[in-house]
Image: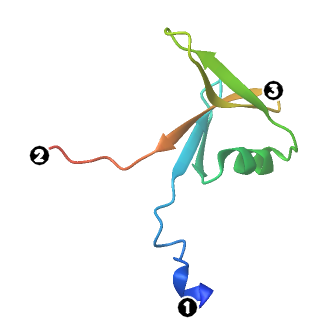
Amino acid sequence: MAPLALMMTSREEIEMKHYMAIDQYGGTYHGLKNPRKDLLERFGRKKASKMYIESKTGEVRHTGYVIAGLWLTVYEVSAWSKAR
């Protein structure tokens, strides 16, 4: 059996997802790898409430967090692909 260290992949080999958040006033927060944890650290808070929206089909979706009175909508950041 291979040692555990050889079986694990490094974090660099796994493509990490990156996120950003926009508050209700248009403020932006970039470079989030774990949105909830990173935003709590930036605002020096310990609690966050989840924020939801209801779609036209009636589906309820988690869209972000309410932290320190700010409504923060979280978006996944992805690379632009060139048109061919």
Q: Which residue is denoted by mark 1 in the rendering? A: 1
Locate residue 50: give its quadrant: top right
Q: Residue at x 46, y 72 (%)?
A: 13
Local packing at callout 1 (Cα closer than 10 Å; few below 14, some 14-19, many 20+) is: few
Circle 1: residue type = Met
Q: Quadrant of the N terminus?
A: bottom right
Q: Is residue 32 above or below residue 67?
A: below
Mark toward the viewer: 2 or 1: 1
Marks 3 and 1, how far apart at CA: 52 Å
Secondary structure beneath dot 1 equals loop
Task: For mark 3, give the secondary structure.
Answer: loop
Q: Is 26 displayed left or right of 50 in the figure?
A: left
Depth check, mark 3 against mark 1: the one in front is 1
Instruction: Check the image and name the residue furthest to the left.
Output: 84
Residue toward you, 33 or 23: 33
Q: Which is more N-terminal, label 3 or label 2?
A: 3
Binning the other alpha carbons within 10 Å of mark 2 as few (below 14), some (14 to 19) or many (20 upward) gives few
> Horizontal placement of 83 versus 56: left or right?
left
Residue at image coords 36%, 50%:
79
Which residue type does callout 3 highlight?
Answer: Gly
Whole-number angstrom distance, CA of label 2 to CA of label 1: 46 Å
Residue type (three-letter) at the residue carrying disc 2: Arg
- Residue occupied by mark 2: 84
Q: In front: 56, or 37?
A: 56
Q: Which structural element holds mark 2?
A: loop
Q: Which residue is mark 3?
A: 69
Label 2, label 3: how far apart the Cα atoms are: 44 Å
